[in-house]
Image (cartoon, helix red, strand yellow):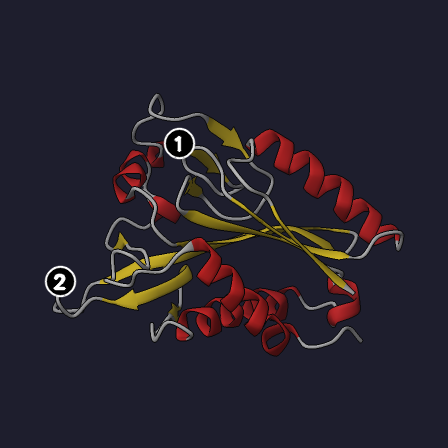
Amino acid sequence: MVEWQVSDGLTPYVDAVAKMEARAADIAAGTADELIWLVEHPPLYTAGTSAKPADLVDPDRFPVFESKRGGQYTYHGPGQRVVYVMVDVGARGRDVRAFVQSLENWIIATLDRFNIKGEVRQGRVGVWVERPEKASLSDGTPREDKIAAIGVRLRKWASFHGLSINVDPDLSHFDGIVPCGISEHGVTSLVDLGLPVTMADVDVALKTTFASAFGDKR
């Protein structure tokens, strides 16, 4: 079974990490069900294991937390759906790359429910959308904005951390970092793309598309 939990209000980041680590340990021990936990955080920045100090542009703007997940600097805050994915990757093929691809496919399928075409790009973590109405880059490449981030950690084949989808956050809050180390492109959200989507709408889409992206445990 996969348990789903939705937390109301803003969940402190330290509390979230403690809960994830405990649940992942129980999943690895076979004493707890897998868990998808949907939260929002107060404004904060997290530094993944590959974070570069120079990418923290405004270190005094919001609290900064060192994170053991993969990746670089990420913003979390109100209006962003953070999805903590605590599953038994060992029972789902023991393939980390395939697990990350499942997360990408899950985001893309969720966005498709709102007629948004999400795409992945070689060398750029996360999910992106083309912005034809925005100016192209200097080399003529169309601008693409990031709408979802991915950063995970595995311990004894149990995963924690996960992904985030920008529903309607304050996009100016991303200015304090170089998101995921990528400065050539911007960030966007479902509402920024002109969709009157609520957090509850996104939650329904996530639940509806989960099985198609992950399938059954082996």
Comparing labels 2 and 1, the label whose residue is closer to the camera: 2
Dividing the picture into quadrants, the one containing residue 120 is bottom left
Does residue 151 appear left or right of residue 96 in this picture?
left
Q: Residues under labels 2 and 1: Cα distance? A: 30 Å
User: Which image quadrant: the N terminus?
Assistant: bottom right
Residue type pointed to by label 1: Pro
Q: In this picture, is 158 found above or below 19?
A: below
Residue on which disc 1 sits: 53
List the single residue furthest toward the top.
60
Image point 55% across, 70% down: which residue? Answer: 101
Q: Secondary structure at mark 2?
A: loop
Task: Please provide percent x and percent y for residue 148.
Answer: 41, 57
Task: Please provide percent x and percent y for residue 88.
Answer: 76, 61
Q: Secondary structure at mark 1?
A: helix
Q: In this picture, is 69 found above or below 129?
A: above
Does residue 158 appear left or right of residue 79 in this picture?
right
Image point 68% across, 77% down: which residue? Answer: 215
Image point 60% across, 40% down: which residue? Answer: 68
Dividing the picture into quadrants, the one containing residue 11 is top right
Please state which of residues 198 and 177 is positioned toward the viewer in this rendering.
Answer: 198
Residue type pointed to by label 2: Lys
Task: Please provide percent x and percent y for residue 21.
Answer: 72, 41
In the rendering, which numbered label is found on residue 124? none
Image point 41% across, 37% down: which residue? Answer: 52
Q: Counting other residues with Cα less than 10 Å from the Cα at mark 2, is it few (<14), some (14-19), or many (20 or more)?
A: few
Residue on which disc 2 sits: 134
Does residue 172 appear left or right of residue 22 in this picture?
left
Task: Please provide percent x and percent y for residue 15.
Answer: 64, 31
